[in-house]
Image: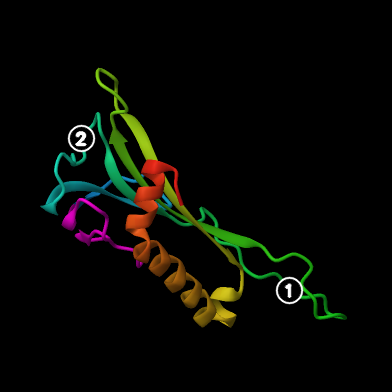
């Protein structure tokens, strides 16, 4: 798999200065994935915990267990009746305590990427553009997303 994380420079969020997340390879929950644990931090991000058993901080990427190919078109019409979809997921898990004297609960952030079979070879540039815009939009609005998640105000 070409997906391989190293240290991550965190996106801009209010209250953090130049956040960095140093990673250690971990064991993914399934064989069709890769996982990393946040082993140390850089920059200023007060009171943030790294990965532990009781407060996980992991990033995982999964591909489909069985990749689907584009089926043959109808020989008389040239139309493909049903286009299968390959689904990829990128999941961040972070343990966080909701209130005093409570156990850690899991924060989950999931990006799901659904790619119709064939797009990867027929129009890879459009697939790359969609990924670039999606990830760029998340990065550009990381602080705003953080504020909205904290206040409920968009």
Residue 95, image quadrant: top left
Q: Which residue is mark 1?
A: 72
- Report if residue 147 lies within the magenta region: no
Residue found at the far front of this picture = 153
> Residue, x 32% and y 56% (percent of image)?
143
The x and y percentages for residue 18 are: 16, 60
**Res 33 visible:** yes
The magenta stretch spans which residues? 1-22
Residue 146: x, y in percent? 35, 50
Q: Is residue 29 visible?
A: no
- Residue position marked by numbered label 2 in the rendering: 52
Residue furthest out toward the top: 101
**Taking 39 as reference, is 8 above or below it?**
below
Identify which residue, 152 or 145, lies in the foreground. 152
Instruction: Give x and y (percent) for residue 37.
Output: 24, 46
23 vs 141, nearest the viewer: 141
As drawn, is 74 to the left or to the right of 138?
right
């Amino acid at each position: 798999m070409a997906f391989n994380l190293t240290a991550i420079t965190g996106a801009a969020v209010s209250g953090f200065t130049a956040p960095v997340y140093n990673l250690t390879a971990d064991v993914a929950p399934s064989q069709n994935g890769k996982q990393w644990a946040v082993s140390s931090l850089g920059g200023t991000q007060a009171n943030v915990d790294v990965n532990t058993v009781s407060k996980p901080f992991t990033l995982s990427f999964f591909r489909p267990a069985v990749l689907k190919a584009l089926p043959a078109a109808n020989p008389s019409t040239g139309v493909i009746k049903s286009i299968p979809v390959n689904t990829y997921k990128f999941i961040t898990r972070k343990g966080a305590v909701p209130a005093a004297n409570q156990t850690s609960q899991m924060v989950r952030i999931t990006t799901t990427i659904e790619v119709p079979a064939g797009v990867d070879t027929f129009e890879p540039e459009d697939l790359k553009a969609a990924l670039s815009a999606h990830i760029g939009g998340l990065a550009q609005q990381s602080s705003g997303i953080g504020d909205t998640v904290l206040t409920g105000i968009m």
